[in-house]
């Protein structure tokens, strides 16, 4: 009986370890096909895939033209949560992820933006709030 419980425990631990991150099973081509078939939605590429701990969902950030979209997908790529945001541990996950991507893009293009500025105005006594 103890051997049986030990073997069962090992099997359980291995199976939990294998399925712990739903993002590993999500492939770009499969997701493109499923979104096209289910919603007639197309996207350019997947920018990020993030495991949402404790939910068995993967947060997928898509680039669609010049826009970004966030959706939450199960590992079987057949269950979607598209609209809205997930609130977990005091954070709106979609909003936080999009803010991070926009900040990264701004920093990437900051020098190019500064080259095309026609004029700028800084009122007397104003502090520089820039954190870049």
Image: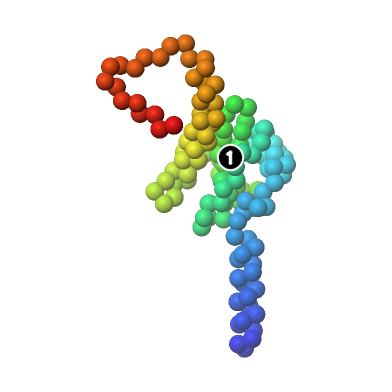
Query: Taking the image as drawn, is residue 26 in sight?
Result: yes
Residue occupying image coordinates x 60% and y 77%: 9
Left or right of 81: which side holds 15?
A: right
Furthest toward the top, the residue is 118
Give the quadrant of the C terminus. Answer: top left
Residue 121 image point, x, y percent: 36, 14
Residue occupying image coordinates x 35% and y 26%: 128
Secondary element type, mark 1: strand
Give the quadrant of the N terminus. Answer: bottom right
Depicted 102 relative to depicted 72: above or below: above
Left or right of 55: which side holds 8?
A: right
Depicted 42 relative to depicted 126: above or below: below
Residue 129 image point, x, y percent: 35, 28
Furthest toward the left, the residue is 125
Pointer 1 residue: 61
Residue 5 image point, x, y percent: 61, 82
Residue occupying image coordinates x 56% and y 51%: 51
**Few, some or many C-alpha atoms within 10 Å of disc 1 (few <14, some 14-19, many ≥20)?**
many
Depicted 71 relative to depicted 132: above or below: below
In front of the other: 1 or 38: 1
Query: Taking the image as drawn, is residue 34 in sight?
Result: no
In front of the other: 16 or 121: 121
Residue 49 image point, x, y percent: 60, 45
In front of the other: 116 or 1: 116
């Amino acid at each position: 009986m103890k051997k049986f419980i030990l073997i069962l425990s090992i099997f359980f631990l291995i199976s939990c370890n294998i399925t712990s991150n739903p993002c590993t099973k999500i492939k770009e081509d499969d997701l493109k096909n499923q979104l096209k078939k289910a919603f007639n939605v197309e996207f350019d590429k997947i920018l990020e895939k993030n495991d949402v701990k404790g939910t068995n969902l993967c947060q997928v950030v898509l680039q669609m033209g010049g826009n970004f979209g966030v959706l939450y997908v199960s590992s079987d790529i057949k269950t979607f949560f598209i609209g809205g945001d997930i609130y977990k541990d005091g954070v709106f996950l979609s909003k936080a992820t999009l803010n991070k991507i926009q900040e990264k893009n701004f920093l990437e293009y900051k020098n190019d933006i500064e080259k095309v500025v026609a004029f700028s105005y800084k009122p007397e006594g104003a502090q520089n709030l820039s954190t870049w």
